[in-house]
Amino acid sequence: MRYIFYFEGAYKSPESHQTSITANINNKQLVQLLAEILTLMAVMNKKISTIITDVVQASSFDTMSDLAAPLRPKRKKVWVDYFVQFRWILVIFVVLPISWTLYFLTYLGDVKSERKSFKQRQKEHEENVKKVVARLKQRNASKDGLVCTARKPWIAVGMRNVDYKRARHFEVDLSAFRNIIEIDKERMIARVEPLVNMGQITRVTVPMNLALAVVAELDDLTVGGLINGYGIEGSSHIYGLFSDTVVAYEIVLADGRVVRATKDNEFSDLFYTIPWSQGTLGLLVCAEIKLIPIKEYMKLTYKPAVGNLKDLAQAYVDSFTPRDGDQDNPEKVPDFVEGMVYSATEGVFMTGRYASKEEAKKKGNVINSVGWWFKPWFYQHAQTALKKGEFVEYIPTREYYHRHTRCLYWEGKLILPFGDQFWFRFLLGCMMPPKVSLLKATQGEAIRNYYHEMHVIQDMLIPLYKVGDALDFIHKEMEVYPLWLCPHKLFKFPYKTMIYPEAGFELHRRQGDTSYAQMYTDVGVYYAPGPVLRGEVFDGAGAVRTMESWLIENHGYQPQYAVSELDEKSFWRMFDAGLYENCRKKYGAVGTFMSVYYKSKKGRKTEKEVQEAEQAHLETPIAEVDDDEDDQPAD
């Protein structure tokens, strides 16, 4: 087994050969194996100078020579390295047990809620909304701070520090809003409160052969976060982002009014402005979300691809976009799409279609229940296609939806370097994953800043035809692998929203585009960069700034759950401010809720800074609308 070093901790290279510790474990060998693992972790501290230069395999393709990243100066070790190196001890003995307990208690609470009648849930919802309205009316605008939820900063799944809550603020408690109010099979609508998470929804809907049109992969992701922020899944190439599947929002405005916003009522402008607004227009208390019919299994095809990054990009595009432009034809377009690029020369692209239980259980078909705690992590299972070639298997639908939960995509490898080993999966895999909120709660500011510099968790939303350029850029600037690829439609709406397609895309449609939506793709960058793995100097903040500039130049977007280095001017170059600023003034959000830029801005915010920023909003707009018609409905 070959090891490279992450913060002087172990990381098993995806391309590594098995040579040292046997994978065949029996009961007699288990104690000895545990001792070997602990000894190995201790020895690693003496091998800090070890450099493994094959994190990204040397390519035999001529065009890859331009992508070779120069070696950088070696980084001096600091005290935080020691903490990160042995953080797995804290995770195993503290974080995992507490996480499992919280998961279990939450499950019991969810089951109790599900057993209530619709009338009971509706009555509780109405009472909780009245409490929110009453709380807002208690606020003294001249004395109290801006309105924020009472949710603790470390509870959020996002990577931002939520520094804005360190200033004086007026808290409104939304913790009671975690119920599925109704599953309406006739209207094919789910009415849910903002703290309902994906695991909770699929546990209720999948047995009915129903699901949200877009189901984000991680169990703990909440409806409110996916709407106010950003959410995507392998079905987004059909349905768009998570917020695009919402048909109505119930919002408590700054003055205490409760409104229901839809795309065709008097609050249509508010309806189109809620997504990406980070809760800065009002308090979301309920959403009505589109449901679709599903089947019991996902028929998943794994297709390996080898070549340079441009070749991998084209293989990804071809996996779900017909070259004849017939993008709306369900016979030509799969139900689910996902890609994983494992190195500068290798990737695996998966396409899925819903399948019945009868089809899945036909003789000769392979059923793989990837959700069992002892199963290999999904990204590593998919990687086997590079050795054995294309293959097909059937995965239970709910297990497929949450395939990345146990290992948090591949971040689990950094948190627990040996977490993918069979002995760990068999003994402790049932406790995975550690709750992100607890991981954040057990790290101080110094540790957070360390991760911001030495680790990347970013998503880049870009036009699909630029995916090859994006892969080149990431390789040169960060060398992060694996990379996650997931396409999504970016719709042309009656209003110009914060994110919008390229002008005129419908006149010169490219592969994947339609007359009403431009095909974009998410490039998920989640891992330690190559220079960090080699023990070299790496400027994390500088790399993020370079990435943000690249996105602006290429009409891309950066989801604001991640750490952002954007200044205010650059932020409003990336996003459109016209409709957003008009709605903030129209619905009284200015002076009550913090602006979206200031809420996502990195760094500590004092009360004075907050007040000055809000005063600036009252006096002058952040960005002038280029055209008066930009924030008006299209004819």
Image (cartoon, rainbow, N blue to C red):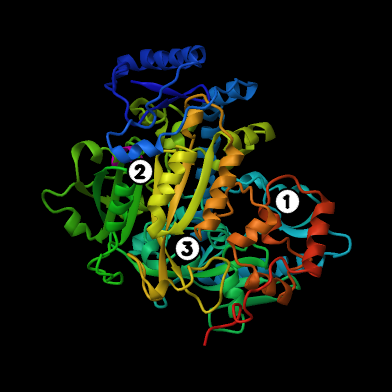
The disc placed on residue 341 is: 2
The disc placed on residue 196 is none
The answer to whether residue 350 is seen in the rendering is yes
For image coordinates 60% across by 49% down, the residue present is 156
- Magenta stretch holds residue 284: no
Q: Secondary structure at mark 2?
A: strand
Indicate the quadrant containing the N terminus: top left, top right, bottom left or bottom right.
top left
Provide the residue designation for mark 3: 242
| Residues rendered magenta in the picture | 378-382
Read off the residue under disc 1. 164
Q: Categorize mark 3 by other alpha carbons within 10 Å: few (<14), some (14-19), many (20+).
A: many
Considering only order in the chain, which callout, 3 or 2, is on the residue closer to the N terminus?
3
Residue displayed at 50% across by 50% down: 459
Q: What is the quadrant of residue 483 in the picture?
A: top left
Q: Label 3, secondary structure: give it.
A: helix
Q: Mostly what secondary structure, the magenta segment?
A: helix
